[in-house]
Amino acid sequence: MLSHYRNLWRWLAPAALALAACGNGSDGTPPPPPGDAQADAGGGDAVTKDMTTTPDGDMPDTVTPPTDSGRMDVMMCPAGQTDCMPTAPAPTCVNTLTDPRNCGMCGMACLSGQLCMGGRCMSTRMTCPAGRTDCTPTAPAPTCVNTLTDPRNCGMCGMACLSGQTCGGGTCQAAMSCDAGERLCSGACVFTQSDARHCGDCGRACATGLTCLA
């Protein structure tokens, strides 16, 4: 019986050694590590990717690299605006339709006091008629007054008369008191029942040749 086992071992030993030497490859070599499998599949060297993470542990978003001019591609002017500094590291975005310093095109500045409307420099401020003074020259719209008669601007802008005073000829004057039946019209006491220049009310003048019978 012992000789039978010895003969069996002599037959099995070479087969066991052959199986131990064999790998998954056909040539008997062990299989490559997982990392090298991609390189073998691509037929070349494996490509190493930068897997650097953010401080939070997340993968970083894709960042657009600077262009040849040093500007970031993501830094662009919004629709309707123009970059007036194309060679600067950061754009200067303006609306050439409304910007008085770049009206119609970059660098086209309007004159002092002008506005840029539709890409054109325009002067929209009205002027006072003859005999009137603009007492708000820096406001968008003028305030036209007659400094000869305006008690708030008597003789000059901002020169207000005292309460009860009137402005005549650019001078503040004390208010006059009229007798019974009279009215103060244009600095004079008149009978509005019979005055042809102030018939029934101050400033209501009768036509030429007519008398006042109020």
Image (cartoon, rainbow, N blue to C red):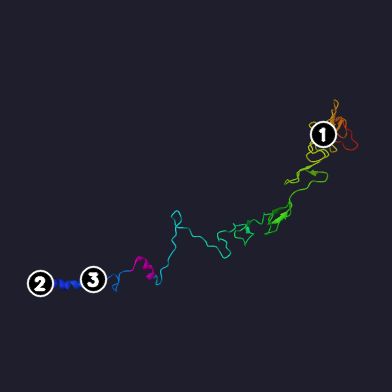
| Viewer-nearest residue: 10 or 77 | 10
* In this view, 157 is above or below 96: above
Q: Residue at (34%, 67%) from the top-left corner?
A: 33
Q: Give the residue pinned by disc 1.
A: 166
Q: Where is residue 133 in the image (x, y as percent from the top left)?
A: 80, 44
Q: Residues in magenta?
A: 32-40
Query: What's the residue type where badge 1 is placed?
Result: Thr
Q: Quadrant of residue 194 in the image?
A: top right
Alpha carbon separation for disc pair 3 and 2: 25 Å
Q: Give the residue pinned by disc 3.
A: 19
Residue lying farthest to the bottom in this orientation: 27
Q: Give the residue pinned by disc 2.
A: 3
Nearer the observer, disc 1 or disc 2? Answer: 2
Residue 95's mark?
A: none
Alpha carbon separation for disc pair 1 and 2: 150 Å
- Give the secondary structure at mark 2: helix
Query: CB under 8 Å between callouts 1 and 2?
Result: no
36 falls in the magenta region:
yes
- Give the secondary structure at mark 1: strand
